[in-house]
Image: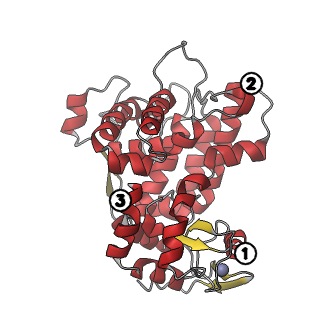
Amino acid sequence: MDALDLGARLAQLLATGRRVSTYKLATLDALLQHCLENPVGEHEGLRVPIPDLAERVVEAYWPQVRVYGEHGVLRQVQHTRPGAVTIPSIVHDLQHEARTWGLSTPAQLRQAEPRRWSAAVDRIAVTLARQPVFRLQKSGGREPGVPFLYDDAWLHDDVSRSTLARHDWSIDLFPGVATALARVSPLLQPVVQQWWVDDVQRHNAAELDVPDLHAFLFGADRAAVARLAPGLREFQDDRCFYCGRRLGAGVHVDHVLPWSRLPLDGVRNLVAVDPRCNGDKLATLPAVDHVRDLLARPEADLQALAAPLRWPVDTERVRSAATGLYRAASPGSPLWRAPGLYDFFDGRLVW
Ligand SMILES: [Zn+2]
């Protein structure tokens, strides 16, 4: 399976299809993330649980259902009756409940209230199966479309829970598709985000400032992760994780594996850094030995740091994601080492 062919085909499908909601974009982004985080051999298939996609969809809409200034909560669906239940409305209610428990991120909620989390994920998984998962491989018209990602013949827009259960609530990617999707993700992810911004503008029929809107929809929640700064600082002997300089007053918490590629908020992916390093690294993949050092931090110390804040550590997720992200990177890609300094990826993982 050629990654570029697959990417071009997906881009064409999304460009020609009529989108009445952002669900299809959210599902494709979730699928790309799943393939990055669960690397398999080049020609292998991959079973993708729809509830796993639903969890990622909750995470994607989580920042997006906040109030956006004078515009209120932004619309993500073209036509809805007032009070209709939509995926964003489910996420909005979930977020409201989480706040009353003093929880601010989806990762915290999943950790602290797993049953409430699962109930919302389950509802969204059914909606995903009936709509975007069923329609992803079809363009807007009546033609059925030839499945090229997974077999969708058993899905339809009223598929029952028992049918979903018979299929293990999963779709099976055809051989080679998972690796191809991971490889093309650096190209497709920014395109998906840009279309998402365009669609939100269209659904809201308002003049929204694009850079602000992009940051609002896709930026990390800096305020929430900042609560981990004191603990991370202490753990790092008050030195910047990347350059080792002593940290001053303006300490930042950085996602070592870039948030824009995989939104992993577990403490395993978080470090305290100085503003100089943080402002220079941006969304670049870091040098592989930064990742080795990230993964070498003792689990017990991270657990001790995370527990009082009811924050997950997620070591296995971060380890698997690191492997997936670097396997999807081409040898020769620039990797960020220090401000103004890049390595070139030699294709070797050192963890
Ligand atoms: Zn630094």
Is 136 rendered above or below residue 260? above
Residue 143 position in % (x across, y down): 49, 29
Numbered disc 2: secondary structure: loop
Q: Is mark 3 within 8 Å of ligand 1?
A: no
Q: Residue at x 73, y 75 (%)?
A: 276
Q: Which mark is residue 175?
A: 3
Identify the residue under disc 2.
205
Is 199 rendered above or below residue 311? above
Identify the residue under disc 1.
276
Residue 229 position in % (x across, y down): 55, 66
Q: CA distance from mark 2 to mark 3?
A: 42 Å
Report the mark closest to the observer, 1 or 3: 1
- Kindly indicate whether the residue at mark 3 contacts the one at mark 2 (C-beta within 8 angstroms): no
Residue 6 position in % (x across, y down): 52, 55
Q: Residue at x 44, y 43 (%)?
A: 102
Q: Is residue 351 left or right of residue 282?
A: left
Q: Is residue 161 left or right of residue 186?
A: left
Q: Name the foreground residue: 207 vs 104.
A: 104
Ligand 1 is found in the corner quadrant, namely bottom right
Q: Residues within 10 Å of mark 2 (few under 14, many from 20)?
A: few
